[in-house]
Image (cartoon, rainbow, N blue to C red):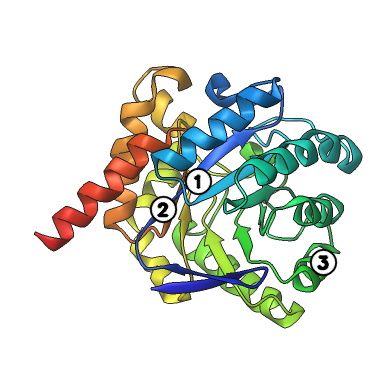
Amino acid sequence: MFTINCKGKLLVIDRPWVMGIINATPDSFYEGNLSKEMDSIVTLAGTMLADGAVVLDIGGQSTKPGSKQISAAEEIGRVIPVIEAIAQQYSEAVISVDTFYSAVAKAAVKAGASIVNDVSGGTMDQAMLNVVADLKTPFICMHMQGTPDTMQRQTNYQNVVSDVLDYLSRRMDICRKAGINDVIVDPGFGFGKTIEQNFLLLKNLSTFSILDAPLLVGLSRKSTIYKTLNLTAAEALNGTTSLNTIALLNGASLLRVHDVKEAWQAVKLFEAYNNG
């Protein structure tokens, strides 16, 4: 069991959480959660909450392999109206912002977000950790080699499991020294890893319990699934559920997904299995 403080609201992670992905970007690798109409985005948020999402993760910048970086100003223009609209409609919703820009994090928390989710673990914007500490929000610290544009050309490890574990351990220490009290760790499936390395991380996911922190797993509809099965991302729901179930069995605390209902069903079946 873990607790995290979201802007003064103490939340308990005493069962696995589902985090619903809402893309405010026109170039996500999966088009299922894309919408340009604010009413549709707010409706999607409501559906996700009703289906079991504890957190809604709002992102305005694609981080798929080879994606090109947009400015903080452009990202703010994409995500802030979405966060404001969702926070206004669903005042109790826990919203995270998926960004590696400290300026976006600051604007998002002001607009209603209460968690910062950074794929770079605070390495792409040197001000990020101090800003998050000042904001007093939990920080999702992910492992990635390189940047989204270069990461799939940087997949060399001595041992992917121990290398990622060591990295996250060091970053957690840096986060805490910066004044961040609540750190959630994410091994970064698909971020600077081959398909084989992703499966190795998943198989050894329980190793990350040594970090004594909530563990987020983001496998939803990724190429590890659809390339292995020779499908498209649009066809990868069943594969996603399969790997999410393995992640739960191996210690995942949070599942970051496009399909909340199916992920929540996996959580409930996992709990029934554990209690059986």
The first of marks 2 and 3 along the sequence is 3
Of 147 and 265, which appears nearest the observer? 265
- Write the residue at 57% across / 54% down: 92
- Write the residue at 21% across / 47% down: 269
The first of marks 1 and 2 along the sequence is 1
Above or below, 98 relative to 172: above
Cβ atoms at labels 1 and 2 below 8 Å apart: yes
Q: Say which residue label 3 marks.
A: 131
Secondary structure, mark 3, is helix
Q: Say which residue label 2 marks.
A: 201
Pinpoint residue 235: horizontal percent, then vertical percent: 39, 18
- The reply to whether residue 231 is visible in this rendering is yes
Classify residue 207 as left or right of residue 268. Answer: right
Q: Say which residue label 1 marks.
A: 189
The first of marks 3 and 1 along the sequence is 3
Pinpoint residue 84: horizontal percent, then vertical percent: 74, 43
